[in-house]
């Protein structure tokens, strides 16, 4: 844009589609698409602060690493004195562009190694821009191609570049780890890693907490901005995304807690914002609070566990060890259903530790959601665990209540000969090995570890494969991926023997699982230790490529509809059974009647349709 005097200002406030006739004046192009996926990774080397010699040194350094990773790139003079641009096109047949988290990681590492790098375009997937070859510079000159010089050859070279995400990952690994002070996506706090594409903290999304709900319903007393910050921090810690927050605001824009979004404080009172300004404020404040939440110190347990809690911690720890170590001390789990049974007993033990009791009520649908299974699979797993003596069914569910189970210490599990039997029978375990719980293990520490394991298992990428060859990678590949992260660092880098003991799978099966993970770029080799590690930041991309993204959300929406129908039917039965003239009957008759067919029978299909309409 031009200033009032007619000079070019460093301000890009107009947006047009670049055609064969480029804009008249300086212009830049977005590096990422509207979804935040980078089409180009561009290293902008600026000589203003460090000099042209340093730019040439940094360019040679990056070029060497790009060549080693097998990445093709274009070199252009930026137009400013001594500046260079290295353009790396992203061409991956399985993904439309590079994820923002990977590009930001590359940007921080490159900046650490090369002082002339301007990392801002690569760390802003929404607005990051660079002037392309041919674009004028506001101070004179223009960006011009250096290698290759011919624009037609450069375009063909960029289109044919074999620059896959796997090669970009290899390049990122070669650049080395990102220093903590420069890595804004990684923090030692409770937030951990930021998913820069969704603008959220990585982890399992939770419902809005009661505290945040109350803040949203309260009008700010003095500082509306600080009040909004507390609301957004609570949502960030619940692992909400930017899209979730936008949706929440769109549904209830008049909620008292959104005052700072709706209006701006002035000396004469609050002035309403335009719709565009509201969206800009919400987006800007959300990004700020997500970064703040990621830097919060990890909550540590400040009090000692009581003897009763210590005993429960020891019991749950032994169950966790048995659930994780499939074949460390004998084959305890059946080859096909064992993965589901382990996740089910692991989650029930986690619920017991959260509730501080060995007896818990387990909702099969919520168990399915927490472990990445469907309801029927979770129900069968609970049944096998009861038959095997690993859980005790204390009370069967009735009405709105689910089944109640008591966890059994691993040292008291029934001893049976291991055998492959039909899934409705027990007989899946051998004698558990005695376990010595670490004396300094606290309830909070154990819960954190167990929740992380559950979050990994519940990701959409592990959705069960379908007979047509579609679907996710499945629970067995997930078990191997989880074991990869548990491989001791003092073992062989590719310790198939450990993975075999840990999962119970044969070496051939482990090798097949690792090939599957590698084909989707879900495992990588640490360049320092040469050990395998998983790449959780790639899970969302692979789930999208496999067309299973949102599977868990759709299941939970379906289960919620079933709960509403069941609650309505239970209420109907209560009214029908109540004595005439009783309070239940009198109040129940005032509610929405349960749908009936023309002959008076309960119409459950119509009830499900009502539940769907109510959810919409």
Image: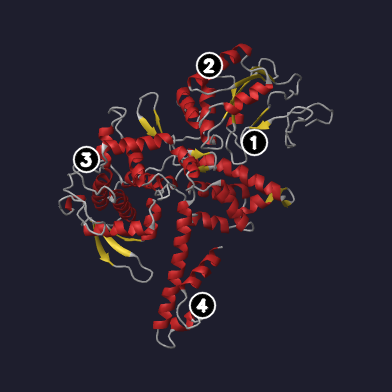
Name the mark nearer the viewer: 3 or 4: 3
Q: CA distance from mark 2 to mark 3?
A: 47 Å
The reply to whether residue 485 is in sight is no
Give the class, few, some or many, for how many residues have Cα within 10 Å of label 4's Cα (few <14, many ≥20). few
Give the class, few, some or many, for how many residues have Cα within 10 Å of label 3's Cα (few <14, many ≥20). some
Q: Secondary structure under badge 4? A: loop
On the image, numbered disc 1 is attached to which residue?
127
Position in image of residue 183 (x %, y %): 50, 31
Among numbered discs 2 and 1, the one appearing first in the sequence: 2
- Looking at the image, residue 615 sits to the left or right of residue 137; the answer is left
Q: Are marks 1 and 4 in contact (CB under 8 Å)?
A: no
Position in image of residue 437 (x %, y %): 23, 43
Q: Are marks 3 and 4 in contact (CB under 8 Å)?
A: no
Say which residue appears at 61% left-offset and 21% top-offset: 74
- Looking at the image, residue 284 sits to the left or right of residue 136; the answer is left
- Looking at the image, residue 203 sits to the left or right of residue 434; the answer is right
Q: Which mark is residue 591?
A: 4
Say which of 465 and 491 sits in front: 465
Q: CA distance from mark 1 to mark 3?
A: 51 Å
On the image, numbered disc 3 is attached to which residue?
328
On the image, numbered disc 2 is attached to which residue?
61
Q: Which of the image's four quarters has the N terminus?
A: top right
Say which residue appears at 46% left-offset and 73% top-offset: 604
Q: Are marks 4 and 2 in contact (CB under 8 Å)?
A: no
Q: CA distance from mark 3 to mark 4?
A: 57 Å
Among numbered discs 2 and 3, the one appearing first in the sequence: 2
> Within the image, what quadrant is residue 138 found in?
top right
Q: Residue furthest front?
A: 468
Q: Secondary structure under badge 2? A: helix
Among numbered discs 3 and 4, the one appearing first in the sequence: 3
């Amino acid at each position: 844009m031009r200033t009032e005097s007619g000079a070019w200002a460093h301000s890009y406030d107009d947006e047009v589609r670049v055609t064969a006739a480029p804009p008249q004046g300086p212009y830049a192009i977005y590096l990422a698409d509207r979804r935040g996926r980078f089409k180009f990774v561009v290293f902008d080397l600026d000589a203003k602060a460090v000099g042209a010699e340093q730019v040439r040194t940094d360019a040679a350094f990056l070029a060497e690493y790009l060549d080693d990773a097998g990445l093709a790139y274009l070199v252009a003079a930026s137009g400013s004195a001594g500046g260079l641009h290295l353009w790396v096109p992203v061409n991956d047949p399985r993904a439309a562009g590079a994820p923002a988290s990977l590009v930001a990681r590359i940007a921080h590492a490159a900046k650490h190694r090369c002082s002339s790098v301007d990392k801002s375009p690569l760390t802003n997937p929404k607005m990051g821009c660079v002037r392309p070859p041919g674009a004028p510079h506001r101070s004179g000159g223009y960006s011009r191609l250096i290698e290759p010089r011919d624009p037609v050859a450069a375009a063909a070279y960029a289109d044919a570049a074999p620059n896959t995400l796997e090669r970009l990952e290899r390049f990122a690994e070669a650049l080395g780890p990102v220093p903590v002070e420069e890595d804004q996506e990684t923090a030692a706090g409770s937030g951990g890693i930021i998913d820069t594409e969704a603008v959220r903290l990585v982890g399992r999304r939770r419902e809005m907490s009661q505290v945040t709900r109350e803040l949203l319903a309260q009008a700010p007393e003095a500082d509306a901005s600080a009040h909004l910050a507390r609301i957004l921090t609570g949502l960030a810690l619940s692992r909400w995304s930017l899209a979730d927050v936008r949706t929440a605001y769109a549904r209830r824009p008049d909620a008292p807690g959104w005052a700072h979004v709706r209006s701006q404080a002035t000396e004469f009172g609050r002035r309403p914002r335009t719709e565009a300004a509201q969206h800009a404020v919400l987006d800007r404040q959300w990004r700020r609070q997500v970064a703040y939440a990621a830097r919060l110190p990890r909550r540590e347990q400040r009090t000692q566990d009581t003897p009763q809690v210590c005993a429960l911690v020891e019991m749950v720890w032994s169950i966790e060890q048995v659930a994780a170590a499939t074949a460390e001390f004998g084959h305890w789990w059946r080859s096909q259903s064992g993965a589901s049974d382990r996740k089910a007993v692991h989650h029930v033990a986690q619920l017991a530790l959260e509730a501080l009791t060995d007896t818990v009520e387990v909702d099969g649908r919520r168990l399915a959601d927490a472990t990445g299974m469907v309801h029927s699979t979770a129900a069968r797993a609970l049944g096998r665990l009861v038959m095997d003596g690993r859980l005790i069914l204390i009370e069967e569910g009735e009405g709105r209540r689910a089944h109640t189970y008591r966890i059994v210490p691993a040292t008291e599990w029934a001893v049976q000969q291991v055998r492959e039997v039909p899934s409705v029978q027990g007989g899946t375990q051998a004698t558990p090995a005695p376990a010595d719980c670490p004396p300094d293990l606290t309830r909070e520490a154990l819960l954190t570890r167990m929740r992380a394991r559950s979050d990994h298992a519940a990701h959409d990428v592990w959705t069960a494969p379908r007979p047509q060859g579609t679907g996710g990678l499945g629970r067995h590949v997930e078990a191997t991926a989880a074991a990869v992260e548990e491989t001791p660092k003092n073992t062989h880098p590719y310790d198939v023997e450990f993975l075999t003991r840990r999962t119970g799978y044969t070496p051939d099966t482990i090798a097949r699982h690792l090939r599957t993970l590698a084909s989707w770029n879900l495992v990588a080799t640490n360049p320092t230790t040469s050990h395998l590690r998983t790449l959780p930041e790639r899970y969302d991309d692979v789930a999208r490529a496999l067309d299973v993204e949102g599977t868990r959300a759709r299941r939970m929406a379906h289960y919620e509809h079933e709960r509403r129908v069941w609650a309505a039917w239970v209420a109907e039965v209560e009214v029908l059974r109540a004595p005439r003239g009783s309070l239940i009957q009198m109040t129940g008759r005032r509610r929405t009647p349960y749908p009936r067919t023309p002959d008076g029978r309960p119409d459950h299909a119509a009830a499900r349709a009502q539940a769907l309409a109510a959810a919409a």
